[in-house]
């Protein structure tokens, strides 16, 4: 099994920056991709960014050019650098790992990100 521990998040003014980090442990070799989802109150959960173990990256259109996902294989960590934050980025952000040939998803407990206007 894979365990995820998230850190970062918090309150920031519009235009500011935050970094989210997610450290994986356990059956690291089963991980196909890691990334971040977010869910705002009253909204559906959406994929913000994801990076595969081969380095392929996808971003939500609304965060392209502002957010950057990266991974540190030696530390089994994935980070999400969020710049030029907007109030509409306010949500709970969840680290997610896709494992076992893309058959399962493991999700972290979530981090609150609040962007004030």
Image: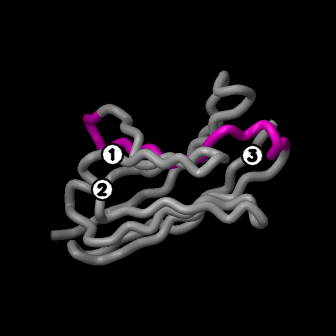
Residue denoted by label 3: 3
Look at mark 2 in the image and give the residue it sits on.
64
Check contact, mark 3 vs mark 2: CB within 8 A: no
Query: Which residue position is annotated with label 1?
Result: 60
Residue 75, image x and y in percent? Answer: 76, 65
Q: Nearer the viewer, residue 28 or 40?
A: 28
Q: Quadrant of residue 60?
A: top left
Q: Which residues are magenta?
A: 27-43
Q: Residues within 10 Å of mark 1 (few under 14, many from 20)?
A: few
Q: Residue furthest left?
A: 117
Residue 21 in the image, given as x and y percentages of width and height: 58, 64
Q: Are marks 2 and 1 in contact (CB under 8 Å)?
A: yes
Q: Does residue 13 lie above or below 61 as drawn?
A: below
Dot placed on the residue nearer the N-terminal end, 1 or 3? 3
Q: Is 19 placed left or right of 78 in the picture?
A: left
Q: Residues within 10 Å of mark 2 (few under 14, many from 20)?
A: few
């Amino acid at each position: 099994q894979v365990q995820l521990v998230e850190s970062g998040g918090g309150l920031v003014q519009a235009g500011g920056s935050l970094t989210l980090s997610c450290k994986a442990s356990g059956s690291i070799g089963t991980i196909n991709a890691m990334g971040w989802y977010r869910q705002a109150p009253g909204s559906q959960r959406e994929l913000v960014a994801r990076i595969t173990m081969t380095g392929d990256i996808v971003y939500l259109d609304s965060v392209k050019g502002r957010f950057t996902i990266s991974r540190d294989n030696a530390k089994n960590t994935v980070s999400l650098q969020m710049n030029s934050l907007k109030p509409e980025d306010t949500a709970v952000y969840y680290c997610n790992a896709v494992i076992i040939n893309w058959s399962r998803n493991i999700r972290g407990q979530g981090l609150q990100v609040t962007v004030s206007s």
